[in-house]
Each structure stands twice: as structure tokens, then as C-alpha cells.
Image: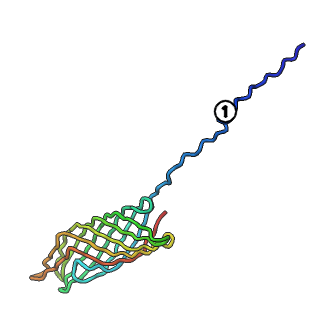
């Protein structure tokens, strides 16, 4: 009785072994660009729209796309008194675009340009108040010192509102509301990763 010989499996050619051993290289991917969010509160002194500089405060929320550009919303309040004992109170809302220039690991220079809407109310003691609305532009810039998620902000502020307004308070008493406003604010911000 004949014993059948075992079947031999042919060896693959060298090229096939080489192809089988090749591992495809990973496709390079671009770094993911994430949104980062910031909330902050500021306080300081503004000159205008009435003659004296007065206290003011604002609160803002910003969203940064990547490291340098972002958008945000800011609201604020200021109350002032004229020499004729008339008063003017203004509230504002600003939609802005914000840019950041890194100066070091902790310090950046931030600037924002936006469209601002005002609600201004003026009056005098024992007289009814008068209100008006305005629209214009706002520019802020200054350094930001980052200490982890918290940042210290110092801002110079300049705004323009057209046209210049005059509100008659009583008799010949007129309150002039200038079209410009400048000042300085400082505060704290919290950065969310």
C-alpha cells in the first residue's frame, strides 16, 4: 500500500511577503481648533457724555476661535450729574470682534471693535426724565495678564455716538450729551478651556 506524500504549500514570492509586511503610514491631521469662552466684569471712570468723569461698570462674554480672534457681547451702566444738578444715566450693549496678540506666556494685548447701542435717560430733581436712543462704535484695547484661568484686564475705552444730543431740562437749562466718550476700566475675567 502506497502512502500518499504530504501536499506542499508553495511559498509566496518575496514581493508578496514585502507587500504583506508594509504598514500604511497614518495620514497627518490638522490640529483641532476649539472654541474658548471668557466672562469678565470691569469697573472704572468714563468722561462723557456729560462734562464730568463718572463711575461705570460693564460685564462681557466672549468666544474665541483658536488663539487670536473672537466675538462677544458686552453691557454696561454709567450715571453722571451735570453742574446744573441735572443727571444722565446711560446703559449700553455692544456686539464686538476681539483680537489678541500674545506678548509673553502670561501677557497678551487685547483689542475689541464693536457696534454699540445706547439708551440714555436724563432729567433734573423734581422733573420728569427724558429718554433717547443712540447707536455708534466702541473701541477698547489694553493688556491682559493671565494667571491660570483668571486674568487681570486693563482697558482704555473710546466711543463715538451720533448725533450729539441736547436735552432741555427746565426753562433755559440744557444738558449737552457729547458724541464722544473716553475712559479707563479694569477688572477680572475667567477663561474656560
**Residue at the location (44% across, 75% down)?**
152
**Residue at the location (32% across, 69% down)?**
75
Tell me, yes or no, if residue 150 can be seen here. Answer: no
**Image position, residue 159 (x, y; %):** 26, 72
**Image position, residue 81 (x, y; %):** 23, 83
Per the image, label 1 sits on a secondary structure element best described as helix
Residue 66 vertical position relative to residue 44 in the rendered view, above or below = above
**Image position, residue 57 (x, y; %):** 34, 76
Residue 10 vertical position relative to residue 101 in the rendered view, above or below = above
Location of mark 1 (residue): 15
Q: How many marks?
A: 1
Residue 20 vertical position relative to residue 99 in the rendered view, above or below = above
Instruction: Name, please, the residue furthest toward the front.
Output: 14
**Residue at the location (22% across, 77% down)?**
49
The answer to which quarter of the image holds residue 172 is: bottom left
Q: On the rendered structure, is 45 left or right of 84? A: right
- Residue closer to the observer: 56 or 138: 138
Q: How busy is the neighbourhood of tag 1: few (under 14 within 10 Å), some, or many (20 plus)?
A: few
The answer to which quarter of the image holds residue 102 is: bottom left
Instruction: Name, please, the residue furthest toward the left.
Output: 171
Amino acid at each position: 500500500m502506497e502512502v500518499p506524500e504530504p501536499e506542499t504549500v508553495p511559498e509566496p514570492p518575496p514581493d508578496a511577503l514585502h507587500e504583506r509586511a508594509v504598514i500604511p503610514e497614518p495620514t497627518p491631521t490638522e490640529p483641532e481648533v476649539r472654541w474658548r469662552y471668557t466672562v469678565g466684569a470691569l469697573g472704572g471712570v468714563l468722561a462723557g457724555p456729560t462734562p464730568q468723569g463718572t463711575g461705570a461698570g460693564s460685564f462681557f462674554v466672549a468666544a474665541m476661535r483658536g488663539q487670536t480672534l473672537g466675538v462677544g457681547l458686552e453691557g454696561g451702566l454709567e450715571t453722571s450729574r451735570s453742574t446744573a444738578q441735572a443727571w444722565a444715566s446711560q446703559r449700553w450693549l455692544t456686539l464686538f470682534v476681539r483680537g489678541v496678540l500674545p506678548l509673553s506666556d502670561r501677557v497678551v494685548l487685547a483689542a475689541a471693535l464693536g457696534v454699540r447701542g445706547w439708551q440714555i435717560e436724563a432729567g433734573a430733581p423734581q422733573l420728569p426724565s427724558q429718554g433717547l436712543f443712540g447707536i455708534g462704535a466702541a473701541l477698547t484695547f489694553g493688556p491682559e495678564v493671565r494667571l491660570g484661568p483668571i486674568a487681570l484686564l486693563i482697558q482704555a475705552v473710546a466711543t463715538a455716538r451720533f448725533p450729539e444730543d441736547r436735552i432741555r431740562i427746565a426753562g433755559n437749562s440744557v444738558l449737552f450729551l457729547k458724541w464722544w466718550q473716553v475712559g479707563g476700566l479694569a477688572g477680572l475675567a475667567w477663561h474656560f478651556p
